[in-house]
């Protein structure tokens, strides 16, 4: 069965790494982009599995000892772990592709995404706040200590869409545009 | 010290045990003590947070008694069973020195040899006179990402 959607930004899964699945499942016609229902359920389940591992890794930081990194590192506070968890929930709910999760010796937790020379990083070192930066096509932008309010900051969301489109346009068989996104140059200037 | 003075520190030895100053064609290794610091064959950016400390980030030169220095480093840092030696990650000196923002180098590397580890060195970050329009905090994270990019040869314990 085939369903039609115009909300490409969400139903396209905003997946940054699954372009092979996309090319198998998306059928293009002159007016709409159709996504097979089976593709959506498979992809969501795939993403759920990835996020499960991330939550497990995140909670494992509670078990870190002092000097866990050999250089005097301390474990992240419960407040920082909870803050990272709350934003991981937001990413998952928005079906953003799973990030890499990292921990620093000063107790910071960070998520990152990478594609060739493009890079996005979100970090948590203050309770209920996040800092992010991205480098996209050699242009760098960032915002610090933003209060987490249940949404993805607009420029961060832009960077996810940008990275997603970088991957999808590599496949010449499909041509996708995000109708909701603004021109990238607007964000990069 | 200003920018030029910091770079000038690379031109002479900083220890009587030093075999020689560090040249561009050398490699250095950062020892890793936790599997939390890498995944999918790549070192994490957060593993380089210490590079911004006043004491710099300790590394070992591959050309000078590396295996012996590695064993001694593991012994000295893995002393309470609360961390776990995982391996080391290497970078070319030239690549580190080529990290440049707005015509300014971001790191300098000093040969800080020790009696028991002649290949010991430290990498220090330079406080840049430019900010690329970024806050200090974000610039720091961006620079951390740049140093992680050049430490791209990960050797893990089997």
Image (cartoon, coloured by chain):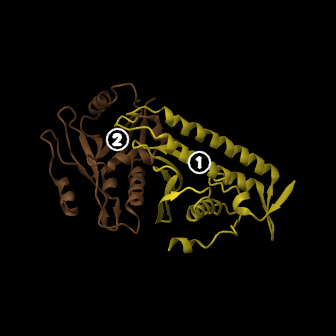
Q: Which colour is chain B painted? A: brown
Q: Is residue A45 above or below residue A23?
A: above
Q: Residue at x 81, y 54 (%)?
A: A36
Dot 2 and dot 1 residues touching (CB under 8 Å):
no
Query: Percent position (x, y) of residue B52?
Result: 32, 51
Q: Is residue B24 above or below residue B114?
A: below
Furthest toward the right, the residue is A1
Query: Would you say residue A120 is visible in this rendering?
Result: yes
**Tag 2, which chain?**
B
Q: Between B16 and B138, which is closer to the camera in this rendering?
A: B138
In this rendering, would B126 be left or right of B139? Answer: left
Disc number for residue B30: 2
As measured in the structure, the alpha-carbon distance from the residue carrying label 2 to the one carrying label 1 is 33 Å
Query: Percent position (x, y) of residue A47?
Result: 67, 46
Q: Dot 2: what SS?
A: strand
Query: Percent position (x, y) of residue A26?
Result: 76, 58
Q: Residues within 10 Å of mark 1 (few under 14, many from 20)?
A: some
Image depth: mark 2 or mark 1 in front:
1
In this rendering, would B94 be left or right of A106? Answer: left
Residue wearing tag 1: A86
Query: Would you say residue B25 is visible in this rendering?
Result: no
In this rendering, would B146 be left or right of B5? Answer: right
Q: Residue at x 28, y 57 (%)?
A: B126
Q: Which colour is chain A painted? A: yellow
In this rendering, would A41 be left or right of A150? Answer: right
Q: Dot 1: what SS?
A: helix
Q: Residues within 10 Å of mark 2 (few under 14, many from 20)?
A: many
**Tag 1, which chain?**
A
């Amino acid at each position: 069965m085939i369903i039609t959607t115009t909300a490409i930004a969400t139903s396209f899964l905003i997946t940054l790494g699954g372009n092979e699945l996309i090319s198998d499942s998306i059928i293009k016609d002159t007016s709409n982009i159709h996504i097979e229902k089976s593709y959506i359920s498979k992809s969501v389940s795939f993403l759920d599995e990835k996020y499960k591992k991330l939550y497990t890794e995140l909670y494992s930081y509670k078990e870190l000892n002092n000097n866990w990194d050999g250089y005097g590192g301390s474990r992240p506070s419960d407040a920082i772990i909870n803050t990272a968890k709350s934003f991981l929930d937001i990413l998952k709910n928005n079906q953003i592709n799973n990030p890499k999760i990292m921990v620093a010796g000063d107790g910071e937790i960070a998520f990152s995404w990478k594609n060739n020379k493009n890079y996005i990083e979100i970090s948590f070192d203050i309770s209920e706040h996040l800092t992010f930066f991205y480098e996209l096509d050699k242009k760098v932008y960032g915002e610090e200590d933003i209060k987490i309010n249940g949404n993805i900051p607009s420029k961060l969301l832009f960077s996810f869409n940008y990275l997603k489109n970088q991957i999808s346009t590599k496949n010449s068989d499909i041509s996708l545009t995000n109708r909701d996104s603004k021109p990238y140059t607007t964000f990069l200037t | 010290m200003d920018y030029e003075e910091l770079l000038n520190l690379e031109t002479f030895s900083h220890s009587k045990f030093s075999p020689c100053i560090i040249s561009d064609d050398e490699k250095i290794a950062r020892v890793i003590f936790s599997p939390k610091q890498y995944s999918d064959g790549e070192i994490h950016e957060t593993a380089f947070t210490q590079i911004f400390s006043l004491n710099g980030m300790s590394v070992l030169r591959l050309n000078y008694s590396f295996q012996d220095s590695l064993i001694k480093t593991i012994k000295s840092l893995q002393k309470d069973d609360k961390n776990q030696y995982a391996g080391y990650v290497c970078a070319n000196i030239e690549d580190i020195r080529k990290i440049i923002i707005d015509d300014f180098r971001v790191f300098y590397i000093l040969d800080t040899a020790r009696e028991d580890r002649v290949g010991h060195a430290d990498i220090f970050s330079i406080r840049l006179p430019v900010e690329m329009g970024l806050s200090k905090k974000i610039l720091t994270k961006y620079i951390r990402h740049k140093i992680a990019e050049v430490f791209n040869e990960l050797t893990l314990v089997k």
